[in-house]
Every structure is written in C-alpha cells, then in structure tokens.
Amino acid sequence: MAEPINYDQYRLGTKDGEIRFGTIHEDGIIAGVENTSGETAENGIPYYIVMDKTGDSKTGRKGSTTIECPGTFNVKAGYTCDSSQSIPGVSIDAVSGDLILSAQSGRIRIIAENIELITTGSGGENGNISLDANEKIIIDGKQGVTVTSETSTRIFSENTVDVIGKAILNIYGGLIDAADGATKVNGSKPCSGPHTNEERNRQWKYLIYLLEKDYL
C-alpha cells in the first residue's frame, strides 16, 4: 500500500509550541489538527493534542481526539450551572462503546454530595453492577446500610460469615430454614418432611466428597 501524501500540510509555531494541519503519523494516519508543546518532558513523555482525520472508524481512530501530557490534566467548570435544576457542570457521554476510567498506579476517587450508580440494561445479562476486588470490599454507612432485592439476596463465604448486632439482632422470615455441617449425617426432626436447606447441604457435601476423591 502506497504511503499517503498530503500536499496541504501547514505549520505555525515558535520555540514554545506549534500547531500543524494535515500531519501524517508514522502509521499513515493523517491528523487534521495537531497542537504540540515546544518541549518534551525529561522522561520523554510528549505533550500534545491531536485530532485525527483519517483511519478506521470502526476502531475509533478516524475522527478521534487524543490528549497526552506529562503533568496534571485539570478540568474545572460549572460555576454558573444551577444544580437545583439538574444542570450538569461537566458531562461525559460515550454514545457507543465503553467509558473507561483508569489510574494505573493511583486511586479513583468520586466525591460528591450524593453518588448514584444506575444501570438501564435488561434481559438478565445487562443491567448489572459488579464490584470485583483482589482483597476486600468495605462498606461503611454512618447511619445505616440497606440492601433490598425483589427476587433473592445471597451472602456467601468460603470461610466464615459473622452476623453481629451489638445491641439487637433481628432475624425474620415467613419461614426460616437452617442447616449445619452435621446435616450430612444426622438431620433434624422436622414436623413435616425434610428441610430444603438440609437436602441442599447434603448434596453439596456429597459433591465435595466426590471432587476430593476425583470421582468427578
């Protein structure tokens, strides 16, 4: 494939910075506008803003804007916005594709009077909020923590689960069914038929036994 040629390239600049039109990148992509600082950071990180004109639109390169700088990138706005009317001070909208916030060697902090996480997907596979931590997930509500669901709520641990109410612990259920490890051998004596949790616990223990013996 022949290398692209742009006869309309144009440059304005001084020792402090420059703006270029129609620059051809090393990969053959033509930049519509490129604004570059006159100096590069000591560690070699460039300082520029570029708006690409050509490229693959499916991968997002065509019509993309890239900003890279060696120092802090600050955005501050919304001084005249009326928060009581839900007018956003800063709005970022990824019309299609993902929105990624990444801090490779730092923290991501979201600070506000109120924070809302809202999903709009449906169908079972979408509409979910996932929290995945290598170590711990810590939730601290000074006035309380409320967890509600319309179908089911499940808390599971491979080791220990502590439920503690220092003053009062209330446990209520239309029906309460409980089972411990001894269920594998000796079940309780229910008034009518075996308990669901006991049957499930027996099956679970038996499945672990088969796995440990390499029968499965």
Image (spheres, rainbow, N blue to C red):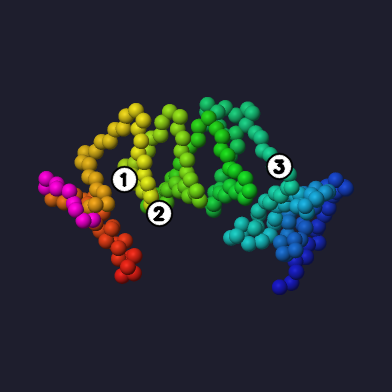
Tell me the amino acid under the disc marked 1: Ser
Q: Residue at x 23, y 56 (%)?
A: 184
Q: Name the disc covering residue 72, or none.
A: 3
Q: Amino acid at mark 3?
A: Thr
In the foreground, 85 or 161? 161
User: Across the whole image, how many numbered discs are drawn on residues?
Assistant: 3
Give the number of the mark in front: 1 or 2. Answer: 1
- In 3D space, how far apart are the residues under numbered discs 1 and 3 (Cα atoms)? 45 Å
In the depicted structure, whether residue 173 falls above or below residue 14: above
As for residue 68 lying within the magenta part, the answer is: no
Q: Earlier in the sequence, mark 2 or mark 3?
A: 3
Stretch in magenta: 184-192
Quadrant housing the C terminus: bottom left
- Name the residue beneath numbered marker 2: 125
- The residue that mark 1 highlights is 152
Q: Is residue 188 magenta?
A: yes
Residue 134 tag number: none
Going by the numbered disc 2, the residue's amino acid type is: Glu
Q: Residue furthest bottom?
A: 1
Q: Quadrant of residue 143?
A: top left
Q: Secondary structure at mark 2?
A: loop
Q: Secondary structure at mark 3?
A: loop
Near-viewer residue (119 or 155)? 155
Mark 1 burial class by Cα count in 10 Å: few <14, some 14-19, many 20+? few
Which residue is located at x 73 percent, y 64 percent? 28
